[in-house]
Image: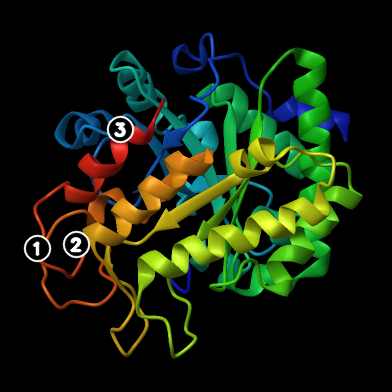
Amino acid sequence: MARRLLAAAAAAALLVLPSPAAAAPTALPARVFAPYFETWQPETLAGMAQQSGARYFTLAFLETLSRTSCTLAWNGEKARTVASNAYVDDIAALRALGGDVVASFGGWSADQGGTEIGDSCQDPAAIAAAYEDVVVRLGVTRLDMDIEGRSLTKADGIDRRNKAIKLLQDWAAATGRRVDIVYTVPTSVTGLEPSGLAILQNALANGVRVDVVNLMVFDYYDKVTTDMGAAALSAAQGLYNQLHTLYPAKTPAQLWAMVGLTLLPGIDDYPKKTEITYLPDAQRMLDFARANGIGELSMWAIQRDNGGCPGVTDSNTCSGIVQNTWDFTHLLTPFTG
């Protein structure tokens, strides 16, 4: 996540028969809170759902095994490739509780290290086949492309990724599947930075249907932002204006439905410790999302939603502020519907 830890023959070879977790996939709710789940942590999805009350999770992250690889694995670990069916049973258990997952690709570490699949795999058809394999094995209806770090400026990777997504969408249409595409990108307080906007422009040029643009409303690194709630609302309005320019035929409701916001509870990694998201900031985002019909809310990450480390910056396992366990999750979960 931001500023830190986040060919037909080839396609045929990668695709597999649907597993029990992939049976009868259904689309996510029109509005969904889907916090990120750190796949390098020991928790299970079903266990986390039962403890927190959340039912939808964004699994972070799928990345390749090397800078020249097309093989996807959770957290880039050889023992947990997509073909190993890691998380298949856990996803099935989560679905039995009424939940579901989004598969997320990239993240800060992969994007910096060259193991985001759009950067490491040179063939768009092979990238598309890898995406299709994830869709079929896991039975997911939404994929999240977390593009940050060096991946933001790798023009060849951006173009390959978008070409592969277009192939994926054509395959989904031909096979009667639903596959929504989310682009998760950094933001300024006024909307997308030029690098993020260029990703969407390239997607349009390649004929990609963009379903959600998910802003990481933290780590601004602008030396002035301290009111994280106001900054998130300003970023969302700026993105809306940019989407209106990119998609002039869409209605306001359709444009707002394309907006997503991912907050980071507590202290992010800005060195001055002035970028701190508190519960009232999250409440402002929730109220704004409901009022405007935003499509997705998320959080980096579910494992951070506790007050176990007051004052600590950017921990993977706690927020760094004084709070009750699951405060942010309990606030935001009712957004789903």
Q: Nearer the viewer, residue 116 or 305?
A: 305
Q: Residue 91: which quarter of the image?
A: top left
Mark 3: amino acid: Pro
**Residue 130 point in image, percent of width and height:** 68, 38
Q: Nearer the viewer, residue 94 or 65?
A: 94
Crowding around mark 2 (Cα neighbors within 10 Å: few <14, some 14 to 19, many 20+) is many
- Name the secondary structure under disc 3: helix
- Compared with 68, 45 (above or below) is above
To which residue does mark 3 refer?
Answer: 334
Mark 2: amino acid: Cys
To which residue does mark 1 refer?
Answer: 308
The answer to whether the residues at label 3 and label 2 have Cβ atoms under 8 Å apart is no
Q: Along the polypeptide, which appears first: circle 2 or circle 1?
A: 1
The answer to whether the residues at label 2 and label 1 have Cβ atoms under 8 Å apart is yes
To which residue does mark 2 refer?
Answer: 318
User: What is the spatial separation of the Cα atoms under label 3 and label 2, in whole angstroms?
Assistant: 22 Å
Q: Along the polypeptide, which appears first: circle 3 or circle 2?
A: 2
